[in-house]
Image (cartoon, rainbow, N blue to C red):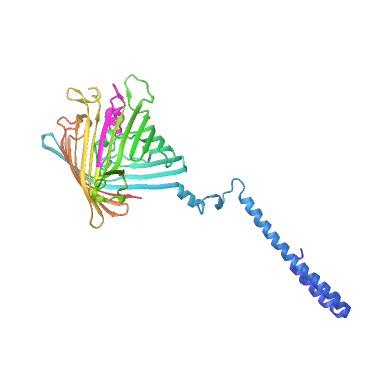
Amino acid sequence: MIPKWQTFLLIMLFTFFVYPLGEAGAEHYDELKGEVKRLIEENKRLMERLKKVERELSALKAKQPGNLVEEDLPGAESLGEAVRERVTLSGLLEFGGVYRNTSYGHKVEEEESDLAMTTVELDFSAQIMDWVNVTGVLLYEDPTFTPEENSLDVDSASIVLGHNEGPLTLTLGKVYMPFGALFTTFPDAPLIDSPLTLLLGEANEKAAILEYSTGGLFISAYAFNGDVEERGGAENRIDGYGFDINFQYGFDFSQLNFYKRGEKFKHKQESCIDFVVGASYISNLADSDYISDMIGDVVDNYVGGIDLYYHLEHRRLFLDIEFMGATERFSGSVLPSGNSGARPYVWNLEAGFTYNWWKEIQVAFQWAGSHDTESLAIPKRRYGVNLNQLLFEGVTFSLGYIHDEYHDNDIEGRDARELAYGQMAVAF
């Protein structure tokens, strides 16, 4: 391979020293000139081959184990795109203000008001492969009228095993038990203690949940080691369990046939209703977060809980009904009611409508109540109205009023309570 500067030098030498030699020199010069031209062409070919070899070596080096290149990511233009396809992030921020007026015996009243950043929530999920998914929720809560500072905690985290389109999934982790539907259109705790079903039945435990679904049928069965133990029984034993079964369908009156809930758009909406009907059972109702905070972590015997729920919607109207209660009485030393143990139950009924005037607005009315819950400080009767106004995509402003009436022997001595509240919620 002859560099270009050497080629140029040869041409100059032959030009000055060979040309003057005459005809013989001229012939010799022509031969040398042809040889130089051939060497130049050969040099070009060698340079092109060298560049090709360098490109092939670079490609082979990039494909060695541990080196990830874009071609190795099917359907993704970059590593960042692949991450976006597999990982989902979402969150919720809620800020609210509450005014409450509580009346006690002997005409004593107490007025209070508070502002709080009630919820800061970050949710993530990652699709590891078709059969494995992981989820997690980081949560900060600051309940109104509570002076304590709370920290950001892992509210839930789970590993979900099961094909994306398969009927069977297994969830392992720290999760909320599928006990009850806890239907509500009102802002819930920690802004206000709503709904009453959430107070009585919400339980966050480390558990294994097996779920089967087909069409609009969903069946869940679960086992967990609860925080509340039987007196004299073994600690740290997996003896909590439960199940939930619900149907989620729609019915088209014009064609007299059922369809999977959420597929109303395929039918005439004016002749369709969507509904959810279900039932739940949990082996130890005292494992609910609220009850265990109120009575402690020891009971004389486990008391099961049941829940029945129903949701109906037609066009812009909706109705939610839920009943939750204990299957038998607690012992009087653990949860008293009158001269015996309590058998608490609650119900919640909400009805309302949505209307699109500028943005969608939802108006709901609530009637709720309880029995044998004076030791749990749960209202005997509740009446409320709530308005949810969509301001922007993911931004909702809520405004509402609740009137509570308490049991005669309420543990906190209350007779009645008025609540007025407002909340701004941003979901992303």
Nearest the viewer among 3 and 24 is: 24
Nearest the viewer among 186 and 327 is: 327
> Residue 324 lies in what quarter of the image?
top left
Q: Is residue 387 above or below residue 325?
A: below
Please indicate whether residue 45 sits to the left or right of residue 334 in the image. right
Q: Position of residue 299 (x, y in %)?
A: 29, 23
* Residue lying farthest to the top in this orientation: 232
In the image, what residue occupies the spot 33% across and 31% down?
243
Q: Is residue 382 above or below residue 231?
A: below
Q: Is residue 413 above or below residue 61?
A: above
Nearest the viewer among 266 and 422 is: 266
Instruction: State yes or no: residue 293 in magenta.
Output: yes
Q: Position of residue 414 (x, y in %)?
A: 16, 35
In the image, what residue occupies the spot 27% across and 53% down?
390
Q: Is residue 415 above or below residue 269?
A: above
Q: Position of residue 295 (x, y in %)?
A: 27, 28
Please indicate whether residue 384 sits to the left or right of residue 264 in the image. left
Query: Which quadrant is home to the N terminus?
Result: bottom right
* Residue lying farthest to the left in this orientation: 106
Q: Position of residue 288 (x, y in %)?
A: 30, 32
Is residue 363 at all visible to an observer of this figure? no
Is residue 156 at all visible to an observer of this figure? yes
* Residue lying farthest to the front in this orientation: 255
Instruction: State yes or no: residue 374 in magenta.
Output: no
- Number of marks: 0
Q: Which residues are magenta?
A: 284-311
> Residue 372 lies in what quarter of the image?
top left
